[in-house]
Image (tube, rainbow, N blue to C red):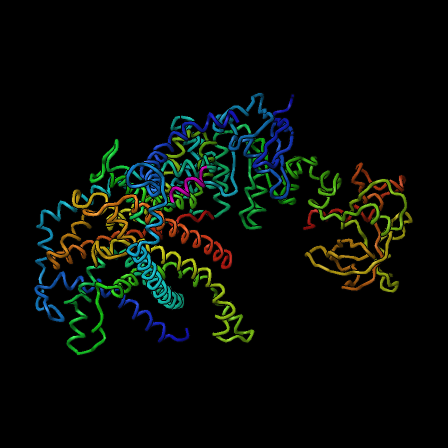
Amino acid sequence: MKNKGYHYAVIVLLMVYLLLPLLATLLFALAKDWQATILPSGWTLEWFAGMLQDARFMESLGRSLLVCTLSVLLSIIIMVPTIYIVTVYMPKLEKLLYALVLLPYALPGVVMAVGLIRIYSGGPVPITGTLWILIGAYFVIILPYMYQGIRNALRTVNARELTNAAELLGATRAQAFKLVVLPNILPGIMVSVLLSFSILFGEFVLANLLVGGRYETVQIYLYKRLSESGHLSSAVAIAYFGFVLVLSGLLLRLGKWVLRTPDIR
Amino acid sequence: MRRSRRFAWPLLAAVLPFLFMAACFEIVPLISMLFSSFRAEAGSSLTLEHYLTSLSNPFYTKAIRNSVLIALYSSVIGLAVGMIAANTITRLPETVRDRILMISNMTSNFAGVPLAFAFIILLGNNGLFTLLFDDIGLPVLGEFELYSWTGLVLVYVYFQIPLAILLMYPTYYGIKEQWREASGLLGAGTVQFWRYIGLPLLLPGMLGTFSILFANAMGAYATAYALVGGNYNLLAIRIGSLTAGDVYVRPELGSALAVLLAAAMLLAMWINERMMLKVRRDLAG
Amino acid sequence: MGSYFTLNAITKSFNGSQVLNNLSLEAEQGELLTLLGPSGCGKSTLLRCIAGLDVMDNGSILLDGVELSTLPAKKRNVGMVFQSYALFPNLTVYDNIAFGLKMRGDRREQIRSRVEEMLELVELSGKRKEYPHRLSGGQQQRVALARSLAVEPKLLLLDEPLSALDAKIRRNLRMELRRIQQRLKMTMIFVTHDQEEALMISDRVFIMNEGQIIQSGRPEEIYTEPSSAFTARFIGHYNVLNRQEMEAVFGLRELAGSAYAIRPEAVKLRPADEETAHGVKAQDDSFRDSSALTAQGHVTEVTVLGSLIRCTVSTGETEIQADMLNDRYRFPIRQGTGVTLAVDPEDCRNLDHGGAIGRCPSYQKNESFTSLSGSRFTAR
C-alpha cells in the first residue's frame, strides 16, 4: 500500500470529525458544571439519574416506543404478505408497488406533512394531533426500508421457486408461505424492522408538524428541553444514540447473516 | 385467462390493506396538496397565484435561494470529503474498512435535534471550541456564528459526509486494482489514470451522489429547526410554518412551495437513478 | 389416445410473442423423454405449463387418462426438479423429503419408512439430519430428486437439473438419474440444452426450437439423421451446405435438395502431397472408391479436442470442418497443409427429404466409415 501515512491521516481526521460532536455531547451529559470553561469543572451521573426520574421523559419514551412499535407491527402485518404475493404471484404489479414504496424515500417529511395536514385537520377524519395520524404517516415513511429488506430476503432464498416446489408437493398457498417461505425470510424481516425502528425513533419532522406538543415523543421532548436543561438533554441524546448503536450492531450482525445463508451450491 | 383470474382473487384481497394505507396516507394527501396549491385562498376557483408568489415575492425567493445555496455548499463539501474518505477506505485492510463503514453508517443516524445540540455544545456562544479559541487568542472563530448561514452549512456538512461515503464507496470499490496496474504497465501515471479512466468511471457516481446529497439538504428540516428555530428563512422551514405554524398559516401557499420542493426532489432522484444505472453498467463484472 | 401422457396443441404467448406454438407430443409409461433446445426455445415454459406453474393459452394435457389443464399444480400428481434445486433451507434433508408426504397427510410411520427408502435410493442415508447448505451441489440435487420421487408422482419433470453442477459430477449424476429412472420405471421429461446429456440418457429426444418440436426420435436416429439444418448444426456440428455450395465444392450438377448436412467425422482428409500420402492410402480405402465425392483445399485451422483433431478446410468459397482420430496413424497436419477431402455420398444428408445424396443410388458400404463413426459421441 502506497501513501500509507496519508491514508491513515485521512482516516484519523475523519474519525475525529465524525466522533467529536458525539464526544462533546457525552462530556456535557457527564459534566457537573460547565459554564465559561473549556472543560467541565466536575463529573457526575446525576443527569442520567435525572432523566430516569423525569416523569415527562419516561412518558415521552413510552409514547415513542408505542408509536414506533405499532407502526412497525402494522407494516409487518401488511407488507410481508403484500411483497411476497406481488413478487411470487403478481409480478405485473411489481412496478406499481415499487413506485408507491419509493415515493416516500424521494419526498422529504415536510412535504408529506403538508398533504397529511390538509386531509386530516378537519373533514370526516380529524385525526391530526393524535397517535393515529402518526402511525399512518410512519407506516408510509418506512415503506422503502421494509420493502428493501423483505424483497432482498425473498430474492436470496428464491421464494418463487420454493413456493413452486412446495405447491407441487401438495402444499396449499398458505402452507407454502407459512412452512417454507416465512421461516427463511425471517432474518430479512428483522433487518427491515430494526432499520425502520431506528429511523422512526429519531423522527422529528412529522412528529413536530402533525402532533407537536399534543403527543410528545422523545424527539419532541428533547427539542423542548434543549433550552431548559442542556445537561439533561445531553443525557437523553446520549441514551438515544446508545439505543441506535445497539440497533445498528444487531443490524450489522443480521445483515451479515442474511448475506451468508443464501449460498445454494 | 379465466383460470388465472379465479386463482388471483384471494391474493388480490390480501394486497388490499396495503393499497388502502398507501391511498390514505400517501397518495390522497399528495394529490390534495397538489390541488390545494392551485386553489385560491378565498373561494374555490383555480389559480396560479401561489406559484407566482412563491417565485416572485422576495421573502419566498430568498427562502428558496437560501435553501439552494446551503444545499449546494454542503453537498459540494460533503461530496469532496466523502470522495477522499471513500478512496482511502478502499485502500485499507478489510477489518479496518468494515469498522469505518460501520461508524459512518451509525453517525449518519446522528442528525436532527441531537446533532444540532452537539454543535451548540461545540461551537455555540459558550461552546467548547469557542472558549478554547478565545482563550488561546486565535481569531479563527472570531467572526464565526453558529446560528448563521455558515453555521448551518457546517452542521449540514456533518450529516452529508457519512452519506457521501456510503454512496461513493461502492463506486470506488468497483474500480479494480488491476485497472490501475494495467494502465501503469501501459505507461500511464497516477494523474493520467485518474484523468482518462478513474474520473470518467467515477463521474456518474459523483453526479448521482451529489443529487442525493442535494435533495437530502434541501429537504432537511429537523436540524435547522432545532438550531435556528422556525423563523429562519429556509424553504423546508417556511413550508412547515405556512402549513402548521401557530401564527401565520397559509396552507395553499405552503402547498405550492411544497410542490416545488417535491418536484426538485423527484428530479434529483431521477438523476440519481439514471446515474446509478450507468455506474452499475460500467462497473459490472 | 392410447398413450400414457399426451400433450395436444399447446399454445402460449407471452407479451405478444409466441413461446409455445401448437406443440404436441406423446410418451409411454416408463419412458424418459428429453426436450433439447437452445435457451429461449420454450422448453422450460413447456415444463412449467405441464406442472401448472404457468398458465397456457390453449391445448390439452392428458396424464394417465386425466385432463390436467383445469387442475391446480398441487392436484396434478406431477413432480418437478429445479435447476437451483429449490430445497427448503430451513428444513433438514429428512424433512425436505418428508414434506410432500406430510402435506398429503400420511401417517408418521408411513412417512418414516418412505423417507428412509428414498434416502437409500439416492445414497444419502448418512445425511438425513443435515441442512441443505451443508451439502454439495450434487448431493443437494439428489435430495431434490428424492423429495420429488417420495410422493410417487405419475410424471416427473426435470428442468435442467444438472446444469449448475461441475462437469464431472454432472456426468456421474446423469448416469445415476438414468439408473433410478429405469429401476422405478418412472416417466420423466428432462429438459436440457446439452446435446451430449440428451443423447446419453434418453429413450427419445425431442428437439425444440422457437416453441415447436422440429424433430424427435431415438438418440442414435437423431444424431445420424438430422432432418433440418437446425438439428444438424445443434446436435453434431454438422457442415451444412446449400445446393450451390455443394455443387461448387464437389463439382456436382443438378442436385435435388436445397441443403445438405455432412458430419465432420465423415469427411476424410488426405494430404495433397503424394509423398506424405503414401502411408495413409494403405489404411484408408475411401479415396480409392470411385463413388466418393472429393475436393481440394487447404487447412486453415487445427484444433485439438483430445481424442479428435478438428480441421477447418477451405475449399475456395466454402469452409468445411473435418474431424479425425488423434491416433498415431494420422499424417502430420498444420495450418496451410494442402489436402484432398473425400466424403461418402451416403453421408451427405439431404435436409429436404431425408435420406442421403440422390446421385449414386447403388453404393457399397465402406468398412472405414463404420469404424470411425464409433467415435461420434466423443465429438464435443
Prevailing secondary structure of the magenta residues: helix
Rendering coords of residue B206 (x, y %):
43, 62
Say whether residue C45 is visible: no
Looking at the image, which is closer to me, C81 or C53? C53
Instruction: Specify the farthest residue to the right.
Output: C290
Name the side, left or right, on which B225 lies relative to B273: left
Q: Does the magenta run of residues contain C237?
A: no
Name the side, left or right, on which A125 lies relative to A46: right
Rendering coords of residue C24 (x, y %):
65, 29
Rendering coords of residue C223 (x, y %):
72, 42
Residue under the image location 21 percent in, 47 percent down: B248
Looking at the image, which is closer to me, B284 or A130? A130
Where on the picture, by quarter, is residue B123? bottom left
Looking at the image, which is closer to me, C2 or B191? B191
Say whether residue A74 is visible: yes
Q: Is residue C113 above or below residue C279?
A: above
Name the side, left or right, on which C378 lies relative to A148: right
Q: Does the magenta run of residues contain A94?
A: yes
Residue under the image location 87 percent in, 43 percent down: C255
Where on the picture, by quarter, is residue B138? bottom left
Q: Quadrant of the N terminus of chain A?
A: bottom left
Start-end of magenta stretch: A93-101
Q: Is residue C71 above or below residue B66?
A: above
Looking at the image, which is closer to me, C39 or C83? C39
Q: How many marks?
A: 0
Residue under the image location 15 percent in, 56 percent down: A226
Rendering coords of residue B231 (x, y %):
21, 55
Q: Is residue C10 above or below residue B69?
A: above
Name the side, left or right, on which B20 lies relative to A63: right
